Image (cartoon, rainbow, N blue to C red):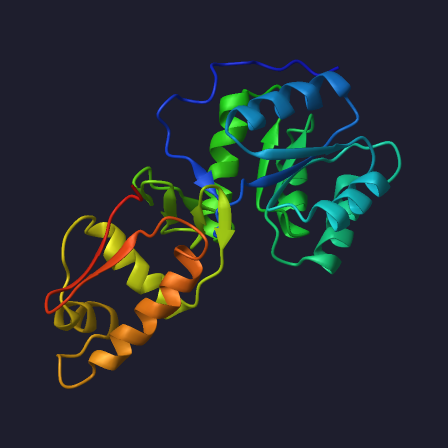
Amino acid sequence: MAAMRIEGEATPGRVELRRPDGEPVRVLVVDDEPTLTDLLSMALRYEGWQVRTAADGMAAVRAARQFRPDAVVLDVMLPDLDGFQVLRKLRADNDSVPVLFLTARDAVEERVAGLTVGGDDYVTKPFSLEEVIARLRALLRRSGFAVAARPDAVLTVGDLTLDEDSHEVRRDGRLITLTATEFELLRYLMRNPRRVLSKAQILDRVWNYDFGGQANVVELYISYLRKKIDAGRQPMIHTLRGAGYLLKPAE
């Protein structure tokens, strides 16, 4: 087995990467050395990512079709197909998934060959786990398959949460489906909890035009939100006659 340097762990406080839909990043690790795949899997899961492994080329192709990874760590030397053949099959199914080649070969011509057939980066054994993770993070950022999750992206008022990155809304843990306009209206209310917002303010912020006899639009969408947020529960959205609306935790 090729030697491998294990230098450090995932850096605490490092900005977390997630898929654009808010789900964890998915990485497929392909290598026939169980110790190596175990170590890589452990390091990648420490990053908060989902990991699937495969020990040969055909298993990698099957896993990729089921798992739909956001990135692939691919060894060149495999028992059946070589990594270059596997890459061609992966590209046939998903021509944009970033691939990081992992191999004991360190000759310049091998590196060139790996990149020529479509690989995105190349790490030679022995390697450090930190280097592999750093290169994967760079590939994921460049490809657009992952975005930095902002720690302040989730708004919370009582048992109601709104994730500004994934656009998921939940009350008491239950997912609530909103239209784009309903989402913007709720986001504005949740950014101003316990504050009375006038119809004019809401129109200007959510619909981007000044108040001009369109109060019925606000009333209509407030009623839509109430049906989804408050239905069967203690109400959180309240009307103050002549003043506007406010959102506060249920009592």
Q: Position of residue 172 (x, y in %)?
A: 45, 42
Let me know if residue 233 appears in the view.
yes
Q: Position of residue 233 (x, y in %)?
A: 42, 50
Q: Position of residue 45 (x, y in %)?
A: 57, 27
Which residue is located at x 49 percent, y 60 percent? 177
Q: Quadrant of residue 161?
A: top left
Question: Between 175 and 141, which is closer to the camera in this rendering?
Answer: 175
In the image, 58: left or right of 126? right
Position of residue 224 relative to residue 54, above or below, is below
In the image, 39: left or right of 216? right
Q: Residue furthest bottom?
A: 213
Which residue is located at x 10 percent, y 65 percent? 243
Q: Position of residue 145 (x, y in %)?
A: 52, 51
Question: Between 104 and 154, which is closer to the camera in this rendering?
Answer: 154
Let me know if residue 125 appears in the view.
no
Position of residue 243 relative to residue 209, above or below, is above
Q: Quadrant of residue 104?
A: top right
Q: Residue furthest left?
A: 242
Which residue is located at x 64 percent, y 18 percent? 39
Position of residue 33 relative to residue 210, above or below, is above
In the image, 81: left or right of 16? right
